Amino acid sequence: MDMQIDSNHIVSNIEQHFKVSAGPGAGKTHWLVQHIKNVLHNSKRLSKTRKIACITYTNVAVETILDRLGNYSDHVEVSTIHSFLYKHIVKPYAVFIADEYGLNIEIMDGHDDTILSNYSFLEEWKKKTRQFTISEYNVVHDAFSNLKWKYDSNMDLICKTDRPFKAGKYSIKNDSYFEYKLMTWERGIIHHDDVLFFSYKIIHKFPFVLEVLRAKFPYFFIDEFQDSNPIQVNIIQKIGERETTIGIIGDIAQSIYGFQGADPSQFSSFTLNGMQSYEMIQNRRSTNSIINALKLVRKDLEQKPFRNKQGELPKILCGDRIVAYTQAQVYSSQENVITLSRNNITANAMKQHYNGGQLNNKLFNELQTQDTNTERRLVISSCVKGVEMARERKFKDAIKELMAIYKRNVRDKEDRKKKALNDLHFLMERYDVFKGMSLLNFHSFLKRERFSDISNLSKGGAKTFYENHSYQDLALCVRVHEDLSSHRTIHNAKGDEFNNVLLLVNDEKDLDFLNSPNLQVDEEHRIAYVALSRARERLFISTPSLDLKTRKKLEGVFSIEDV
Ligand SMILES: Nc1ncnc2c1ncn2[C@@H]1O[C@H](COP(=O)(O)OP(=O)(O)OP(=O)(O)O)[C@@H](O)[C@H]1O
């Protein structure tokens, strides 16, 4: 039986494994911070070298927790699971498995989301995997971008993609993906997902590594556990077999990372010897009216209002989304309204106040197919990505993008960084000059002002592509990691809260989560639920249209207006 607690509850037995389940806004993260302080005060097992590990989902969440811990943060290591595993398992012990996997540890330098797919690399891969007829390199790039480590039927890890990728009539061979991985490791490149693979392999082959981890971390707490993938769960389970106290916190209805292997059932089924389960039933975040809308979507859990402020009825605004946004701002007395979108391109379009038309989110892929000149393509795409990332204040990511331009020709990393910094400075100062250009003019601008070595565009598919698309078209497709702007994807709003939220849906069919909600089986419904539950004071939904039947059904919980 779960013990009901509120977010001020102080646990008396800090040595017991625990699981905290609660809905959105219950105060899970708040409680976690208090619990860490409680352990710091009362534990006899901590020292300078024996700390609490606190795992959160994003770097932004890491900062939030560190901030809330203030002076207490000295004895706590707060990090994302990938950074934690890289620092404490892969980096120190990769040497044990380097030969087996051809991992070049001399040049291995952290982990990232690099996908190798330049011409010479792919030619080598084709030869090694005997797939000579493949010429659709953009398909191969997509296939490599969708790889995940998964368990096979023998509980061994294999590198897989969820869908068969076809290059022309030819299906890419499943076993050729492992060869891709070997080729990247040989070049010292480790993808985020490989951190899980290597950690898993290391702890299973060399169990003493687990002993070291347990000695260093007598407590191991994980927030947003519902989005862990099965390999992470296995590693955590192993650590918790003895000595270390494990605590997991989460909400099955907020599991939204299925594409990364997360499965909500893992949170419900996770157990360890003597684990105590707690449940929180309050919602400390939202007004009663917003909580009523949340109750409409979710029935499996009590969501008891804590603030007890009635608030305004959430509004469904039918019609143009920019008008809906303006209207939402008026209703919010011109306070900031955060828009939440399902897709990256919609969020980016909102940043430009662009209300639709034909948005094509595959333009970087098309660029790859249409422009076979690797150097030119790299300069164009890195400049667009770098600028757009910097505009969202993601300077580290922006520099990394631009450094890629010099990967081949500049050996020293610091020199590459300096060049990238200069480029970024140059481009940001001239944003107003090129932001309205076609890609063709942007190419000429870059060649004239900065990158004289890139090839001319004379004729053919590449030139047509550059003529027919603008800088802005491509900019809309840039994915900003951990975007903190006012126009975000729902995934980027996880764990956060805002006074005023406007959820954007592209089609009234996307309101299925209100009409016939099924959070247990439908991840799209859970994603929409995460969006609604970010709102503190006011909630708006923008849809192009809404049929009469649904209007009738939702009236009372929502006020519905045509805009
Ligand atoms: N005991 C408390 N005292 C004061 N404020 C609290 C308390 N518990 C929670 N809060 C506040 O309530 C809000 C929701 O809390 P929190 O973000 O911790 O919820 P959560 O359960 O982690 O939500 P979600 O799952 O939606 O991310 C925050 O503004 C938090 O500061």
Image (spheres, rainbow, N blue to C red):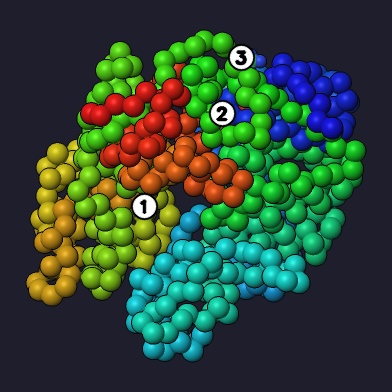
Whichever of callouts 3 and 1 sits on the residue coming sooner in the sequence is 3
Which amino acid is tagged 2?
A: Lys
Whichever of callouts 3 and 2 sits on the residue coming sooner in the sequence is 2
The answer to which of 290 and 183 lies nearer the viewer is 290
User: Quarter of the image holding residue 321?
Assistant: top left
Cα separation between marks 2 and 1: 43 Å
- Kindly state the secondary structure of the residue where label 3 is placed: loop
Q: Which residue is mark 1?
A: 401
Q: Position of residue 57 (x, y in %)?
A: 59, 40
Query: What residue is drawn where x is 85% and y is 27%?
Result: 14
Q: Which quarter of the image is occupied by the C terminus? A: top left
The answer to which of 399 and 266 lies nearer the viewer is 266
Whichever of callouts 2 and 1 sits on the residue coming sooner in the sequence is 2
Residue 338 sits above or below residue 243 on the image: above
Residue 55 sits above or below residue 87 on the image: above
Tell whether circle 3 marks a residue whose Cβ is less than 8 angstroms from ligand 1. yes
| Left or right, 422 with reference to 532 | left
Which amino acid is tagged 1?
A: Glu
Q: Which residue is mark 2?
A: 295
Q: Position of residue 350 (x, y in %)?
A: 28, 37
The reply to whether residue 404 is visible in this rendering is yes
Q: Which residue is mark 3?
A: 306
Which amino acid is tagged 3?
A: Phe
The answer to which of 499 and 443 lies nearer the viewer is 499
